[in-house]
Image (cartoon, grey):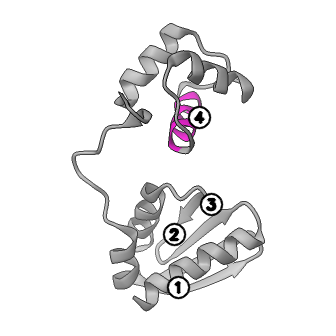
Amino acid sequence: MTKSFRQGQILRLIRSQSLFTQDELARKLREGGLEATQVTLSRDIRELGLVKTTDGYRELQRETPHAHIASLATEFLRDVRAAMNQVVLRTAPGHASSVAVALDSESWPEVLGTIAGDDTILVICLNPEVADSVAARLRQMLEG
């Protein structure tokens, strides 16, 4: 297990549920097959910039917010097509990366990840039904 993988799992957990203590976080990581000591968790929490709120651990807002996917979709998205558990997005040339970063920063739970080229983005979803739902949501933004 690498540090970046463990920290990624911590972010996934706190984004999807309310965890109020390091013990709860350690237990959820163990349930996922990852062992982490209290010292390691403390360091990870500090490095990730997590803060304890009334809703559990949360990420601090970034100082430079990413462009919102809806505004980028309206400006650069040209086509949306679902294919099995994937959605293929076509953008204006040179803009796929910025649209993919904006989509990633939205942290949609139904999006497992994105891969961007120059004018094409591959959005990977859990299953075909979810891909259809994501495609419909993005088409709605495209129609604006």
Residue at left offset 31%, top offset 38%? 60
What element does badge 4 sit on? helix
Q: Earlier in the sequence, mark 3 or mark 4?
A: 4
- Image disc number at residue 110: 3
Provide the residue span drawn in magenta: 5-15
The residue carrying pointer 2 sits among few (fewer than 14), some (14 to 19) or many (20 or more) residues within 10 Å by Cα, namely: some
The residue carrying mark 1 is 139
Q: CA distance from mark 1 to mark 4?
A: 30 Å
Q: Earlier in the sequence, mark 4 or mark 2?
A: 4
Q: Is residue 98 visible?
A: yes
Q: Nearer the viewer, mark 3 or mark 4?
A: 3
| 63 to 26, vertically: above or below | below
Q: Earlier in the sequence, mark 1 or mark 3?
A: 3
What element does badge 2 sit on? loop
**Identity of the amino acid at label 3?**
Glu
Percent across and percent down for residue 118 are: 46, 73
Q: Residue 53 appears in which quarter of the rendering?
A: top left
